[in-house]
Image (cartoon, rainbow, N blue to C red):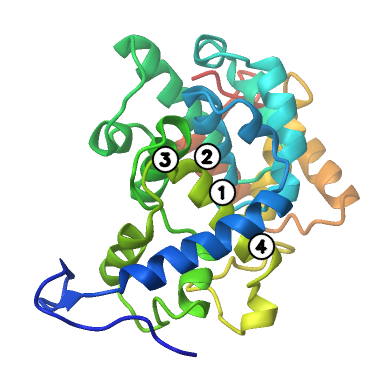
């Protein structure tokens, strides 16, 4: 793999104190190659059709740790039921978790509603990374993505696909720190078309420079789901959203019917109660807590 990176004294500084230099001609050639491919091969994704700040926020939170093909139908249903920030801010917890069911990591749904409530209270959508990161469930990557896709800001947001494209194209390497990789991505942004540029890079990484064709591994991988406590947590929440309340015996029976091991059910129920997802009734049954 040919590297397009060199060190010089008259270019962008990176975290190790040296400077990053990428030839302008190489940058322009790379941008042209990616955009030419993308103009003919762009994926059709529902959140790209109407990238309002709210819809971008929803899609970006859903896409955290979840594959695109799983997000698409859940996103469409979510926007149908909660079409605005205000409708999401007013959502009942049980209904919210019912709609979210199947995406996993249920706390993301609660944090998304908390973010909607904060934004409604503010009276305007945050437009800086600092303001966005102050919202529940929003970190540096998601804040940058929202600014890119909702406001076309000339920033760089690096997901797994984009990282792989930068490495496979010779602009980065697998040993780079996050700060060094960010400096490269910042240098390569197609100014004035940041939203299109990021969509193009993501599609290019998903369809052309894939992990199998490049051999470039992601920096992290999701833990096994089947048989995990995460699977059991999800099953408990799912069953409780489908009824008013359930006894522990009914919960165990339902979960066994799904083929899930209920051994840790009681301890996970206690965790869910502590986290505010679940509460005990006066009849010692369990139900979704309204929060």
Upstream in the sequence, badge 1 or badge 4? Answer: 1
User: What residue appears at the point 85 percent right and 44 percent down from the top-left corner?
Assistant: 253
Q: CA distance from mark 1 to mark 4?
A: 10 Å
Secondary structure state at the residue bearing disc 2: helix
Residue identified by numbered label 3? 148
Residue identified by numbered label 4? 206
Secondary structure state at the residue bearing disc 3: helix
Report the front residue among 125 and 136: 125
User: What residue appears at the point 36 percent right and 84 percent down from the top-left corner?
Assistant: 175
Q: Position of residue 245 (x, y in %)?
A: 72, 23
Upstream in the sequence, badge 3 or badge 2? Answer: 2
User: What residue appears at the point 73 percent right and 41 percent down from the top-left corner?
Assistant: 44
Name the quadrant containing residue 228.
Answer: bottom right
Q: CA distance from mark 1 to mark 3?
A: 10 Å
Q: Position of residue 198 (x, y in %)?
A: 50, 51
Of the two numbered discs 3 and 2 in the rendering, the one whose residue sits closer to the viewer:
3
Q: Are marks 3 and 4 in contact (CB under 8 Å)?
A: no
Upstream in the sequence, badge 3 or badge 4? Answer: 3
Residue identified by numbered label 1? 199
The answer, for residue 229, to whether it is visible in the render is no
Upstream in the sequence, badge 2 or badge 1? Answer: 2
Q: CA distance from mark 3 to mark 4?
A: 19 Å
Residue identified by numbered label 2? 61
């Amino acid at each position: 793999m040919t590297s397009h990176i060199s060190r010089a004294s008259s270019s962008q500084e990176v975290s190790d104190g040296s400077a990053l230099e990428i030839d302008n001609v190489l940058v322009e050639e790379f941008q042209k190659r990616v955009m030419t491919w993308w103009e003919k091969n762009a994926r059709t994704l529902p959140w790209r059709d109407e990238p309002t700040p709210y819809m971008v926020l929803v899609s970006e939170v859903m896409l955290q740790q979840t594959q695109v093909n799983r997000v698409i139908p859940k996103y469409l249903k979510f926007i149908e039921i909660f079409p605005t920030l205000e409708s999401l801010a007013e959502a009942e917890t049980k209904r919210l978790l019912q709609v979210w069911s199947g995406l996993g990591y249920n706390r993301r749904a609660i944090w998304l509603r908390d973010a909607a409530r904060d934004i409604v209270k503010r009276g305007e959508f945050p437009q800086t990374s600092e303001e966005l990161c102050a919202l529940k469930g929003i970190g540096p990557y998601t804040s940058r993505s929202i600014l890119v896709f909702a406001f076309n800001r000339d920033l760089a947001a690096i997901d797994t696909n984009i990282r792989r494209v930068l490495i496979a194209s010779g602009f980065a390497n697998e040993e780079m720190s996050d700060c060094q990789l960010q400096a490269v991505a910042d240098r390569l942004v197609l100014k004035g078309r940041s939203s299109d540029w990021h969509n193009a890079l993501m599609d290019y990484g998903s369809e052309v420079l894939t992990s199998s064709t490049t051999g470039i591994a992601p920096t992290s991988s999701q833990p096994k789901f089947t048989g995990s406590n995460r699977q059991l947590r999800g099953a408990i929440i799912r069953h409780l959203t489908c009824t008013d309340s359930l006894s522990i015996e009914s919960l165990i029976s339902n979960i066994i019917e799904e083929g899930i091991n209920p051994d840790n059910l009681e301890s996970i129920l206690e965790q869910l109660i502590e986290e505010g997802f679940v509460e005990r009734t006066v009849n010692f049954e369990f139900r979704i807590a309204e929060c």
